[in-house]
Each structure stands twice: as C-alpha cells, then as structure tokens.
Image: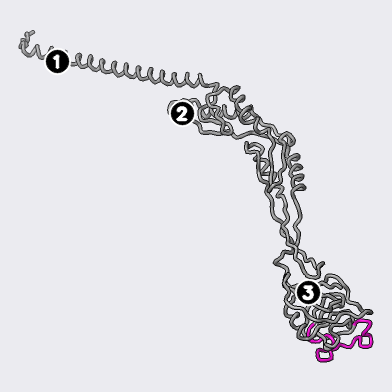
Amino acid sequence: MKAINVPLKNHSEVLQRGRRPRQALRGANKRRLALLFGAVLLLVAIAAFFGFLLIQDMVASGEVFPGITIDGQKVEGLSREDAARIIDEKVKAPLSGALVLYHGDKEVELEPRSVGLTVDTRKMVDTAYWAGRSPNVFSRMFRRLLHKPMNLDVPVLAKYDTKKLMAFVVGVAREMDYPPTSSSIDVSEGYPIINPSRDGLQVKQQETINVLSGALSKHERKVPVPTVAVKPELTESDIGKIIVIGKKEHTLYLYDKEDLINSYVIAVGMPQYPTPNGKFHVTYKEKNPTWLPTSEWARDKQGIPQPPGPDNPLGGYWMDIGGGLGIHATPYEGTLGEDASHGCIRMAPWAAEEVFNYVKVGTPVYIMD
C-alpha cells in the first residue's frame, strides 16, 4: 500500500471543519433551552395569574357581584344574609305602608295587607346572587379584572290577591263616581234662570287596577286615580230660545237663554177649554197649515180639512207643542188679551211669524198662570 502524505495545512482545515457543527449544535440547544425556559415561565405566570383570579372568585363566591342592585338598593359585595337584612329594611318595610289614591281633594287609603301583599326578599336576593354567578367563571374573572360591573337591577318581587284588589277598586269607584248634571231651566220666578250643567266622574276601574299593581311595589305611596269625565245630556250651550207664557197676563215672552227678546199679547183657553199649565216643547212647525178639525168642540166640522187662507183658524203659522195644543196665528185678533181659545195660544199674524222664525223644534215652552 502506498502511503498518502497529507499536507499539514489541509489537516488543520479538516479539524476546524469538524468543530463548527458541534459549536452550532451547542448554540442551537442553548437557544432552545432559553425559549423553553421562557415558555415555562410564561405558562407558570399565566397559571399563577389565572390562579389568582380564580382564588379571588372563590373568595368572593358568597357575595353579590359588583354592579347588582335590588330595587335600586346597593347589595354588591354582601353575603346573601346581609343583603336580605338590607332589603328587608330598605325595600320591604316601606312597602307595608298605606297606599293613598286621590282625585282632587278626595283620598282613599289602601292597606297592602288588606289585599294580601307579600314581598319575597329571599327570592330577590337569590336572583341577584345567581345573576352574578353567570354565565361562567371566566366572565366573572375578567369582569373583576377590568372593573366591569354587571349593571343589573333586580325588581321588587311581590304578590297580592287579585280578587281582593278588584273588590277594593270597585269600592273606590262606588265612593268616587258621581253622575253628570244636565243644565236645567227654572221659571219659578216667572222668567228663565238657567242652572249650569256639571260633568260627572267615573273611575276607570281596569286602569286603576293596573296603577295599583305597579304602585304596590313602589316607594311612592300616593297615586292619582285614573278617571274619565262623563258629559251631561244637556249643557248651557244646548239651550237657545225659551218661551214663557203667562196666562193671567195674556202674554207670551220670548227669551234667548235668560235675555228677553220680546213679549206678545196672546189669547189663551176659555174656562171650559183651559190652556194647561206645565212644561212643553215645540214638536213641529208648519207654515200655512191645513186645519183638520178633530176636537169635540168642532164636531160640526170634523173630517172637513180647512186649507190655508183667511178662514183658516190657525192662520199662516202653527207651532205644535203636543196634546193637540199649539201656538198659532189667528185671524181673530180681537180675541187677543182674553180667555177666548179652545186651549191653544193665539197670536197676531206678525207676532206668530216672528216667533215662528225664532224658534226651532225642541224649543222649551213653559205655561203658567
């Protein structure tokens, strides 16, 4: 075999080349170890951080979560027992006081116990507590970390006897309701005096029940009663012209409400056919009426219509007031100022026309001595 002589310089280069991979390997391992160590430290830190948050959550597990209130009352950070004592004092106790319903200066008191009101403190506290325990532990931990409260208010949880409340409202309506008063006309002094109308009042019972249902669980203990005004059938604005007849004076007075428009000489019924006293109204009006005799005193003319004209005893204007009676023009003006008719009220043609044009169907007519 032939020996190979390697130059010294080349042998050194070979040795150097062998050392370089080993050095690179040792450097890479150091970097991996550093990264691994860093990762382990990070995981330990994260675990410690979550452990801290978890321990914090466990320590506060018996308390109401921050930001949760009951009927506006702060209970955060309290145990359920402490929260219940606060709610009994600040929320439940005030609701046992009388509830006052009012309309105007009239008031009616409702004692909550009379309708069986009960306030469930335990359920309110439990609702507040369990609301803070959801949805999960991570949500709670991060809320505490970021100081983000729940911002939840638990309402008052109350119960009452619906039938007893309805019965109470019926009683309130019975006490507060009153009917409307229509406007009326008083002629006892010989002239019209108009008495004003007044609206009635009616309690809106279902709305009152709804109002009370809400008010029973509120600290405001005075509430208005829902009502509606009941309009009268007749108001002052419905009254227009009024006729007043004074038989002894043989005068018909025409008023616009309480203001005298004019007065007219009339004839009224003779003793055997007297004009009755009382309140009447114009039932219908007719110009140039046809007279159809039906009365006993005109039996010789019964069934024979008398057309309009100078011989028609009703003249040119007829205002019926019921019962066969009427106010009418007469061709017999010489009888005016006397008891001369068969019960009707006779007027001069011009006067009857004037009154005819003033009044309408429904105009009240008062006849008195």
Q: Is residue 196 above or below residue 55?
A: below
Magenta highlight range: 294-317
Neighbor class of circle 1 (other Cα within 10 Å; few <14, some 14-19, many 20+) is: few
Calculate the distance from the C-alpha at mark 1 to the C-alpha at mark 2: 60 Å
Neighbor class of circle 2 (other Cα within 10 Å; few <14, some 14-19, many 20+) is: some
Furthest residue to the bottom? 310
Q: Is 304 colored magenta in this rendering?
A: yes
Q: Amino acid at mark 1?
A: Arg
Q: Is residue 258 above or below residue 153?
A: below
Asked if the residue at tag 3 contacts the one at tag 2, i.e. Cβ–Cβ closer than 8 Å, the answer is no
Query: Element at badge 1?
Result: helix
Query: Element at badge 3?
Result: strand
In-front residue for pair 333/3: 333
Calculate the distance from the C-alpha at mark 3 to the C-alpha at mark 1: 140 Å
Tell me which residue sits at (73%, 55%) in the image.
Answer: 200
Earlier-in-chain disc, 1 versus 2: 1
Tell me which residue sits at (78%, 74%) in the image.
Answer: 243
Query: Element at badge 2?
Result: helix
Earlier-in-chain disc, 3 versus 1: 1
Q: Is 17 colored magenta in this rendering?
A: no
Question: How many numbered callouts?
Answer: 3
Tell me which residue sits at (52%, 29%) in the image.
Answer: 135
Q: Amino acid at mark 3?
A: Ile
In-front residue for pair 248/61: 248
Q: Is residue 103 above or below residue 345?
A: above
Q: Which residue is mark 3?
A: 243
Tag on residue 143?
A: 2
Tag on residue 318?
A: none
Q: Which residue is mark 1?
A: 17
Figure quadrant of the C terminus: bottom right
Q: Amino acid at mark 2?
A: Arg
Residue 17 location, x and y as percent?
A: 14, 15
